[in-house]
Structure formats: C-alpha cells, structure tokens
Amino acid sequence: METKRVVITDREHIKDEELLEAAKILRTGGLVAFPTETVYGLGGNALDEEAAGKIYAAKGRPSDNPLIAHVSCTAELKPLVKEIPEAGRKLMEAFWPGPLTMIFPKSDRVPYGTTGGLDTVAVRMPNDAVANRLIALAGVPVAAPSANTSGRPSPTTADHVWQDMNGRIDMIIDGGAVGIGVESTIVDVSSDIPTVLRPGAITMEMLKEVLGEVAVDPAILGPVSAGMRPKAPGMKYKHYAPKADLTLVEPLRNGAELPENALDGCTVGLGSCQDLACARQPGMDEDGIRRMVDMVGRLAEKKAAEGLRTGIIGTDESIESYKSLKGIDSFLVRSIGARRSQESVAHNLYAVLREFDDLGVDVIFSESFSEDHLGQAIMNRLSKAAGYKIVRV
Ligand code: AMP
Ligand code: MG
C-alpha cells in the first residue's frame, strides 16, 4: 500500500481542503495517522469493526487491547455511551477538549472490535486543531491508538510515524511535532470511585481539585505482578523497552548511605510495587540530585570501561558534567529536557528513546524525576521503559 503524506502548511489557519481526503478515508474504512496534542494517533472509524481490525494489524497490537474513540465535540459522546456519570460530566467540563480519556459504559453502537471485547468504551476529545477538525469532517468517532508499531515508543513527529507505518496505512497528516509528548491521562468514571488507569498531562493534582476523591490503579505504580489484574488491559502487555539495557538512578528520600554493592549490579533496592511507591516522594533536593548525577556518571564510566557502548540521559542542567567522563562518547550523552520544566521532559521523552534505539548503544543510564504533577506520567513511562530497573542513591 502506498502511504500518502499531507503536510499542514499553517496550523493557525488550517484549510479544510487539506483534510477532506483524509476525512473521506476515515469515513470509508481506511486508516489515517494524525497529530494530537499528546502523541500522533493512528485513526480509523471507531464504529466500523473492520477498520478497527486494520488498526490492530497495522500496529501488530493484540486485539484485546482496547482502542480510544476520539470525538470533536461533546454531542458526539452521547451516542457512544450508556450514561455519563456525574464524575465524567465534571471532568468533561474541566478538561475537554484536552489530554484526558474517560472510560464509560458503552452503548450498543460501539462494536466489541473497538473495545477489545469490553462493555466499556474509552473516549477523548483532543485539543489539537488538526485532530479536532479532521474528526469533525470525518463525521464518525475516530478510534486512534498511538501511531507506532506495538512495542516501540509512541511517535511525537510525523517522521516517527513514517518510520513505523509507511506502506501500512493510507495517509499520514504531518502537523509538525506534538505539544505534550506523552499519552493522555485515562480515568475510569464507570466505577464508584473515579480511578486513574494511566497518568498523563491532566495530573492527579488537577483531578483531585475537580473530583475530591480519586483512586489510582496499582498497575501504574510498579510492575504488574502475576496476581494483579490491571483495569486497563493495555497495562498487562509488554511495554516499550529500548533495545539497550536502560537503568534509572533515583535519589533516596533522606539521602541514605550508598549501599556498598551499588556499583556491582544495577538493581539495588528494587522493591515490590508498594515499596516503590512509598520510597518515592515529590520533589528532589539539590543534594539528592547531585548524588544521582554523580551515580549516573560512575555507573556509565564503569560500563564504558568494560567496553560497552554507553549512553546517558541527563538534563539541560547536568549534561555538561557528563561530557568529560572517562570513556564516554559525548555524542551518546543526551538531554531529555530541563529539570525545571517537566513539560520539556515529557515533550522530548519518546524522541530521545527513539534516538537511542537508532544509535545502537548497549546500555543507558538515566536520571529520574520527581513524581508530582506531570512527573508522575514521566516516571511511569521511564520506569516501564527501564523494566523497573532502578538504582537508588
Ligand atoms: P493507546 O491507544 O495505545 O494510547 O492505549 C489505550 C489505552 O487505553 C490502553 O492501555 C487500554 O488498555 C486503555 N483502554 C482503552 N479502552 C479501555 C476500556 N474500555 N477500559 C479500560 N482501559 C481501556
Ligand atoms: Mg500506545
């Protein structure tokens, strides 16, 4: 299949002509990748089981991992759901359009082929002008998971989508780099207590302000253990793991002594999911950050001395200090953004992981981030990418 590429010339003044062909493709059962404010989505008609099937095939995604249906206005939500619970109403008012997906009891119109066999449906109204106009012109709700091959980092540019999807889908709309860079927050409003199934740019703090009580699915705090049944089916699948062996370094809360064997292995202090949650707290003091940066450098030098091609993920604030390390190629030292700007870290996260996949490194050491606000989403994605391999200092 030939994949067409349409470039949006001016995002401030989107012309309908640029999107009409894409809208027609969606309406008639084809696949179009398009930018949203979170990551690029791979769209198909959410009411067409066959189109949903094509999405699963193009991504290589297991068919019981449900898709999120995207709408362009609140009126389009009604036909998709049985009811809109009070919590859903409040969150829609506060955060739609925006990077928030909600789980509702599904109506009969939504096929099981879209929901992975579930009686609930995930719905989001994106706040990206291209996405919003495209969905409106298509005239159907658009099922759109991230437009990457299953198991690769989510795409944040049209080039990323091209790498994974060229020849597999009908069209890619190139609207430039996305804004946020991590996938939407998912909140299940179909249960008694609204529950966060995936952290994102609508943060826990923001949700609590609107709802008061909010629960968190344990699957977002640590590895999914054998007995655990995550509410978001996607959580049980092998998450993205870089080709290289990635280890995070994280400061301990009170600056506890460095364990003696810290440099021998890379899994010091890796506890159960609960330990992991309680060992972390929002905010990192200067001393902790210094210890963390020092440890990233020491671990990297050690691996480089063993002859391994070693990468480092630092920040704008720390990056220079890594470039003079013994045996480290400064080309393999990358900044993921500015520590003082969580937005910049989220924005660059997947692009940096993709770059390292292309660079052919053996091991990567990365700094960690505080888990407040957007930091919860950042650390959720980074810890998953590291397979929860975390060295604490
Ligand atoms: P993606 O489209 O790749 O961003 O992933 C969508 C995520 O939403 C997956 O992790 C799904 O498990 C989750 N999801 C979609 N629909 C539902 C649903 N009905 N109930 C629970 N989780 C859902
Ligand atoms: Mg995805």
Image: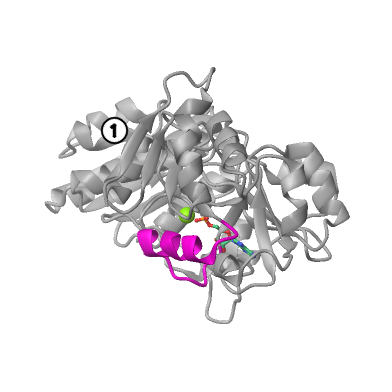
Q: Which residues are magenta?
A: 46-66
Q: Residue drawn at (69%, 72%), measured in percent from left and top?
A: 119
**Colouring convention used in this rendered image of the protein:** one colour
Residue 212 drawn at (x, y percent): 85, 49
Q: Residue drawn at (38%, 51%), measured in percent from left and top?
A: 148
Would residue 116 appear left or right of 1 to someone viewing this image? right
Residue 315 drawn at (x, y percent): 40, 32
- Residue 221, visible in the rendered structure: no
Q: Residue drawn at (53%, 71%), measured in percent from left and top?
A: 224
Q: Nearer the viewer, residue 337 or 258?
A: 337
Q: Is mark 1 within 8 Å of ligand 2?
A: no
Q: Is residue 382 magenta-colored?
A: no
Farthest residue to the right: give it: 86
Residue 211 drawn at (x, y percent): 84, 48
Residue type at the position of mark 1: Tyr
Would residue 307 appear left or right of 96 to someone viewing this image? left
Q: Quadrant of ligand 1?
A: bottom right
Query: Which residue is disc 1 drawn over?
Result: 322
Q: Nearer the viewer, residue 190 or 386?
A: 190
Which element type, helix, strand or loop, lies under badge 1? helix
Q: Nearer the viewer, residue 235 or 169?
A: 169
Figure disc tally = 1
Q: Residues within 10 Å of mark 1 (few under 14, many from 20)?
A: many
